[in-house]
Image (cartoon, rainbow, N blue to C red):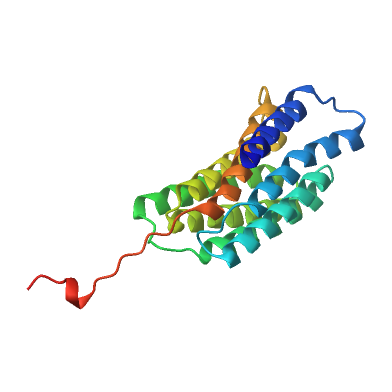
C-alpha cells in the first residue's frame, strides 16, 4: 500500500510540476522539479533488490546525481556534465547485470542514431564556432548511447525502457535547444524523463533468471 501511494505521489507531483508550475520564480520551479526525483529515489530505496544490493546502491547514486543535474541544468554546461556523471553510474550499474549480447541490428541502430545526432546537434555548434560545446555534446551522446547499450545487455525490460525514454527525452531537449523549436517541448521532455528515471529505479526489483543443469537431471 505504501509503495502504491509513493508511486501515486510521483505521478501527481510530476504532473503538478510539468503543467502547473510557472517559470518564475526560478528557485521555486527548481524545488518543485526536484520533488518527483526525490520521491523516485525513495521508491528505489524501498525496492527489494532482486538483481543485487550493489546494483541497487549504484542506481540510487545515479538517481541522486541526476537530481542534482536537474537543479543545475539552468546553467547548461554544469547540467550537462552532471548528467554525464549520472550516466556513468547507470553504465556501471547495468554492467553488474549483463546477461546477453546485444543484437547486431540494435547496435547498428544505436550507432546510426548517435551519428545522426552528432551531425545535427554538435554540427550546428561547430558551424557557429562553439567548438567546446560541440565536443561536449558528442561526448554526451556517446555516454548516453553507451548507457542504452548496457541497459539492453541486462535483458531487463524496465531498464531498457527507462534507457530508451531517457535517450528520447534528451534528444527532444537537444533538438529544441540547438536546431528547431518543438511545440510542447517541456511536456515531452519531462514526462519521458520522469518515466525514464521511474523505470530505472524499478529495475532494482528485476528478476534474474538463472538456469543450471545437474548431472542427475540429464536423460541418458
**Which of 15 and 105 lies nearest the eye of the viewer?**
15
Q: Residue 42 at what x, y percent from top left?
A: 70, 49
Residue lying furthest front: 1
Compared to residue 134, the image places residue 16 above or below, namely: above
Q: Residue 56 at what x, y percent from top left?
A: 61, 60
Q: Residue 189 at what x, y percent from top left?
A: 66, 34
From this viewpoint, is residue 188 visible?
yes
Q: In which quarter of the image is residue 90?
A: bottom right
Report how many numbered discs are placed on residues in the image.
Answer: 0
Q: Residue 125 at what x, y percent from top left?
A: 71, 45
Residue at figure coordinates x 77%, y 30% from the top left: 17
Compared to residue 147, the image places residue 196 above or below, namely: above
Q: In which quarter of the image is the C terminus?
A: bottom left
Compared to residue 60, the image places residue 195 above or below, namely: above
Position of residue 31 in the picture relative to residue 154 (left or right):
right
**Which of 216 and 209 lies nearest the eye of the viewer?**
216
Q: In which quarter of the image is the N terminus?
A: top right
Residue lying furthest left: 220
**Which of 30 and 14 lies nearest the eye of the viewer?**
14
Q: Quadrant of residue 187?
A: top right
From this viewpoint, is residue 181 visible?
no
Residue at figure coordinates x 38%, y 59% from the top left: 209
Residue at figure coordinates x 69%, y 52% from the top left: 63
Amino acid at each position: 500500500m505504501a509503495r502504491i501511494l509513493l508511486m501515486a505521489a510521483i505521478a501527481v507531483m510530476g504532473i503538478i510540476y510539468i503543467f502547473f508550475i510557472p517559470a518564475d520564480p526560478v528557485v521555486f520551479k527548481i524545488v518543485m522539479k526536484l520533488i518527483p526525483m526525490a520521491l523516485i529515489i525513495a521508491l528505489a530505496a524501498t525496492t527489494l533488490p532482486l538483481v543485487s544490493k550493489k546494483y541497487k546502491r549504484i542506481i540510487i547514486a545515479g538517481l541522486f546525481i541526476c537530481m542534482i543535474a536537474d537543479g543545475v541544468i539552468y546553467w547548461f554546461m554544469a547540467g550537462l556534465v552532471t548528467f554525464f556523471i549520472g550516466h556513468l553510474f547507470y553504465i556501471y550499474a547495468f554492467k553488474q547485470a549483463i546477461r546477453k549480447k546485444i543484437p547486431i541490428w540494435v547496435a547498428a541502430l544505436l550507432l546510426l542514431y548517435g551519428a545522426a545526432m552528432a551531425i545535427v546537434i554538435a554540427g550546428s555548434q561547430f558551424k557557429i564556432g562553439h567548438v567546446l560545446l560541440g565536443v561536449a555534446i558528442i561526448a554526451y551522446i556517446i555516454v548516453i548511447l553507451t548507457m542504452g547499450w548496457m541497459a539492453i545487455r541486462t535483458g531487463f525490460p524496465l531498464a531498457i525502457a527507462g534507457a530508451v525514454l531517457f535517450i528520447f527525452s534528451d534528444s527532444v531537449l537537444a533538438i529544441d535547444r540547438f536546431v528547431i523549436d518543438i511545440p510542447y517541448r517541456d511536456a515531452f521532455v519531462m514526462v519521458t524523463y520522469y518515466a525514464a528515471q521511474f523505470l530505472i529505479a524499478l529495475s532494482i526489483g528485476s528478476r534474474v533468471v538463472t538456469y543450471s543443469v545437474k548431472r542427475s537431471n540429464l536423460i541418458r
